Image (cartoon, helix red, strand yellow):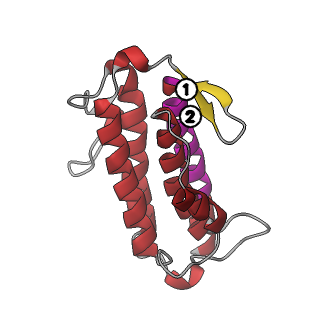
Amino acid sequence: MSATKLPEVWLRGPLVDVQALLQPVAHALLQAREELNELMEGFPEALLWEKLVGMASPGFHLQHLTGVLDRLFTYAKGEVLSESQLDYLAAEGKPGENITGVADLVNAFNNRVDNAIVQLKATDANTLTDWRGVGRAQLPSTVIGLYTHSAEHTMRHLGQLLVTVKVLKQ
């Protein structure tokens, strides 16, 4: 390990005020944020909405990463999605009038991770196994299930984004 490179987030110790059972979720989200910011630094705007062999564009992944965190953390609070969240979902993968540039999409993701960490810190450990409905069908999950899936889903899309970006930059 070089002197300037930090260990992965999970190896830096526990995060202050995050419940022990939620540490892995917070670590994964913070790790994803660091990797995403490094990956997208200097990424050409012209390639943001490019699709390779039917794969999603980098722009889609950036929008989706932000949107899914927002939606899953809303469900974890026991709330239903707002009209603006449903509109955001419908617009994912489409360059829009507002958040269309690389910096805007990266900043939106960073802000969503910040909000997620605040919510994790405020989560009562006694609620982690509480039932939560997902989507219009109110499919069954729990608070910890939603948080865990948010971390897993974020890392999955980060991996897809990484491959797409590296191929596009060749």
Residue type at mark 2 is His
Per the image, the residue denoted by label 2 is: 149
Label 1: few (<14), some or many (≥20) within 10 Å? some
How far apart marks 2 and 1 lie (CA) works out to 6 Å
Q: Does residue 153 appear to the left or right of 122 in the view shown? A: right
Residue type at mark 1 is Gly
Residue 71 in view: yes
Per the image, the residue denoted by label 1 is: 145
Q: Secondary structure at mark 1?
A: helix
Q: Does residue 114 appear to the left or right of 62 in the view shown? A: left
Identify which residue, 71 or 26, lies in the foreground: 71
The C terminus appears in which quarter of the rendering? bottom right
Q: Does residue 137 appear to the left or right of 64 in the view shown? A: right
Residue 8 in view: no
Determine contact: label 2, label 1, CB under 8 Å.
yes
Residue 158 painted magenta = yes
Location of residue 58 by image quarter? bottom right
Q: Secondary structure at mark 2?
A: helix
Residue 84 position, x and y percent, is: 52, 61
* Region rendered in magenta: 144-162
Q: Does residue 67 appear to the left or right of 168 in the view shown? A: left
The N terminus appears in which quarter of the rendering? top left
Residue located at (61% from left, 31% from top): 133
Residue located at (62% from left, 68% from top): 91
Position of 120 relative to 101 (above/below) = above
Label 2: few (<14), some or many (≥20) within 10 Å? some
Position of 11 relative to 43 (above/below) = above
Residue 144 position, x and y percent, is: 49, 24
